[in-house]
């Protein structure tokens, strides 16, 4: 299962930490900061990665919202059958009342994972992706 991590530029380090934890859990992870090299065609590489991915984790923090690249990725996932039921919003540092002001309602409706701060709780993300993977494995052919 290939995981695409969408994040704002301000959360590059947090996205790398999440990618490391997901890789330790044996998931194939794509994150721009690691996978796009200097001189690469950014738009092309992002498009290829989105097409090849099975799950999108949208890493949303208070300091990074609204982020145009993040919102663009989320819009893609919301309209792609490839990510149907497999878009996982991760809200970092938000409480419910604050999130309603900054975070698009559709992401709040998708059952986000709420993290108090930083990488604490990334195990919740690993667990959710594991649940998605098991559902896919058990899906009728």
Image: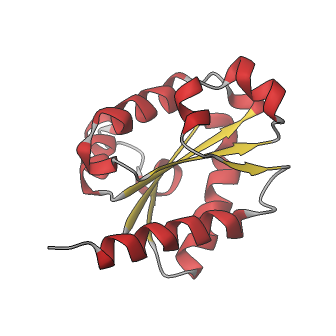
**13 with respect to 115 (left or right):** left
At horizontal 67% and vertical 25% (from top left) the residue drawn is 65
Q: How is the image coloured?
A: secondary structure
At horizontal 64% and vertical 61% (from top left) the residue drawn is 18
Residue 63 vertical position relative to residue 140 in the rendered view, above or below: above
Residue 121 vertical position relative to residue 89 in the rendered view, above or below: below
**49 with respect to 121 (left or right):** left
Q: Position of residue 81 (x, y in %)?
A: 24, 44
**106 with respect to 40 (left or right):** right
Q: How many marks?
A: 0
**Viewport quadrant of the N terminus:** bottom left
Along the viewing direction, whichever of 84 and 36 lies nearer the viewer: 84
Along the viewing direction, whichever of 121 and 5 lies nearer the viewer: 121
Q: Position of residue 4 (x, y in %)?
A: 43, 54
At horizontal 74% and vertical 28% (from top left) the residue drawn is 99
Q: Position of residue 139 (x, y in %)?
A: 27, 72
Residue 54 vertical position relative to residue 87 in the rendered view, above or below: below
Along the viewing direction, whichever of 29 and 124 lies nearer the viewer: 124
State which quadrant residue 138 falls in.
bottom left
Residue 139 vertical position relative to residue 71 in the rendered view, above or below: below
**Viewport quadrant of the C terminus:** bottom left
At horizontal 70% and vertical 64% (from top left) the residue drawn is 122
């Amino acid at each position: 299962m290939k995981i695409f991590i969408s994040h704002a530029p301000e959360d590059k380090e947090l996205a790398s930490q999440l990618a490391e934890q997901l890789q330790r859990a044996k998931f194939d992870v794509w994150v721009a900061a690691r996978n796009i090299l200097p001189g690469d065609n950014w738009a092309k590489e992002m498009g290829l990665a989105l097409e090849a991915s099975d799950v999108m984790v949208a890493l949303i923090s208070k300091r990074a919202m609204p982020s145009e690249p993040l919102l663009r990725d989320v819009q893609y996932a919301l309209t792609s059958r490839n990510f149907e039921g497999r878009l996982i919003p991760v809200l970092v540092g938000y409480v419910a009342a604050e999130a309603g002001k900054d975070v698009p309602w559709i992401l709040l409706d998708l059952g986000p994972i709420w993290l108090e701060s930083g990488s604490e709780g990334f195990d919740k993300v690993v667990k959710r992706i594991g649940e998605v993977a098991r559902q896919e494995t058990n899906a009728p052919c």
